[in-house]
Image: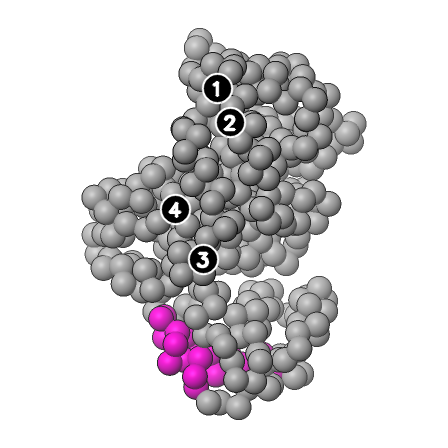
């Protein structure tokens, strides 16, 4: 298992995490089997969006004696009422549900306190200026949570949140279909067939800006819906018109700027094993570039996906990394000092490009790589 820094939180997480929705209706013994497999596979990050009391109690039992080996992403505002999940902003309900969650997990702290499901700007303003954020900040001050997170499907909301400096972790929906959709407050629109009927071209600029802003500000992204609820793995159900593999979806998500961990939903032990097997998969098995370039309803023409197909460069330039630093700076309108420092550590810069064009012949998306190298040399001075 490979591990990544979760932004600037100081927390290390496994690239593959576990979403616990699939643990609903499973016995304590079955939940323990999942935790045993997570530990054996090196999976450390667990998302607790589901508020089902039995799941939380079973997980708490399974974590006995090994709580310190896992990073818990526990949600605020996700509550259980009348036998079902509900989202609330009622601070008394929020507080009671979170305290109950800690008790059921048999712990006095969690690493990530995730403010749950904020998809409208009006809701974000209410959270930011109301008792929910005040409660989250108090929990952090007390050490009950290590960092504050926010989950959203809307890049406008997510950008507004991360730009406040209050959010250390963003849980965001990332996959090759969602990334081409414009921002909206209705998550169902992300998957509506009518929104794919005319074909989509290139990543939505607000989503691109969000990922680059997270990278720049050190906000770690924990990815949800990398498989689109499983639809992307089915040619019949995928709005892209063709199926992708588990490995392709995982690598796509992990290649986005700011991404640290994919919360891989698993309803069976075999599904968890399949996601964890990504860590041992070959380059050919994880490569998504050719698959995306061939999708009949979607195009990324001219857009760098950081997929690495441009390599190897005869001059030894890490073309994808130079392009990523270029895009991060262009999105900021200036060169952030951290980006300049990281660019300076590269053995070769854009100025080392001799214009042979080998990279452009290999790029599945028609990216003007040589022009990007020229612009990077001008921006960074080499």
CA distance for labels 2 and 4: 19 Å
Q: Are marks 2 and 1 in contact (CB under 8 Å)?
A: yes
Q: How many marks?
A: 4
Where is the C terminus found, in terms of image quarters?
Answer: bottom right
Residue 337's spot in the image, x, y percent?
Answer: 72, 67
Mark toward the start of the polypeptide (2 vs 3): 2
Label 4 residue SS: helix
The residue beneath circle 2 is 34
Left or right placement of residue 304 versus residue 97 in this view: left
CA distance for labels 2 and 3: 25 Å
Mark toward the start of the polypeptide (1 vs 4): 1
Nearest the viewer among 50 and 187 is 50
The residue beneath circle 4 is 246
Label 1 residue SS: helix
Main secondary structure found in the magenta portion: helix
The residue beneath circle 3 is 282
Q: Are marks 1 and 4 in contact (CB under 8 Å)?
A: no
Left or right placement of residue 344 versus residue 290 in this view: right
Mark toward the start of the polypeptide (2 vs 4): 2
CA distance for labels 1 and 4: 23 Å
Mark toward the start of the polypeptide (4 vs 3): 4
Segment tinted magenta in the rendering: 357-378
Label 3 residue SS: loop
Q: Is residue 288 above or below residue 185?
A: below
Residue at 51% x, 27% y: name it.
34
């Amino acid at each position: 298992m490979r591990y990544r820094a979760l932004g600037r939180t100081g927390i290390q997480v496994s690239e593959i995490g576990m979403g616990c929705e699939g643990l609903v209706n499973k016995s304590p013994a079955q939940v323990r089997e999942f935790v045993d497999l997570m530990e054996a596979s090196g999976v450390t990050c667990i998302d607790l969006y589901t508020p089902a009391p039995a799941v939380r109690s079973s997980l708490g039992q399974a974590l006995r004696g090994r709580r310190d080996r896992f990073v818990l992403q526990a949600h605020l505002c996700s509550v259980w009422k009348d036998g079902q999940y509900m989202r609330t902003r009622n601070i008394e309900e929020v507080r009671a549900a979170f305290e109950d969650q800690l008790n059921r997990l048999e712990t006095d702290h969690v690493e990530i306190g995730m403010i749950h499901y904020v998809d409208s700007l009006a809701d974000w303003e209410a959270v930011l200026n109301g008792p929910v954020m005040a409660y989250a900040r108090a929990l952090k001050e007390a050490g009950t949570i290590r960092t504050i997170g926010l989950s959203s499907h809307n890049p406008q909301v997510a950008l507004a949140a991360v730009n406040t400096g209050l959010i250390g972790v963003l849980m965001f929906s990332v996959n090759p279909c969602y990334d081409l959709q414009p921002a909206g407050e209705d998550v169902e629109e992300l998957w509506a067939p009518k929104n794919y009927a005319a074909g989509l071209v290139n990543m939505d600029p607000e989503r691109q800006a969000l990922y680059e802003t997270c990278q720049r500000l050190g906000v770690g992204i924990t990815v949800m819906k990398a498989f689109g609820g499983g639809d992307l793995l089915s040619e019949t159900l995928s709005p892209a018109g063709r199926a992708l593999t588990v490995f392709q979806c995982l690598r796509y998500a992990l290649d986005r700027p700011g991404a640290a961990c994919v919360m891989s939903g698993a309803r069976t032990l075999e599904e968890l094993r399949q996601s964890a097997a990504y860590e041992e998969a070959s380059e050919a098995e994880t490569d998504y570039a050719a698959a995306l370039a061939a999708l009949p309803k979607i195009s990324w023409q001219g857009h760098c996906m950081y997929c690495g197909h441009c390599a190897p460069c005869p001059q030894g330039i890490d073309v994808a990394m130079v392009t990523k630093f270029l895009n991060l700076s262009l999105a900021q309108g200036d060169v952030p000092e951290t980006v300049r420092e990281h660019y300076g550590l590269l053995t070769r810069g854009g100025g080392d490009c001799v214009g042979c064009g080998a990279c452009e012949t290999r790029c599945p998306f028609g990216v003007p790589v040589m022009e990007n190298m020229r612009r990077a040399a001008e921006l960074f001075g080499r």
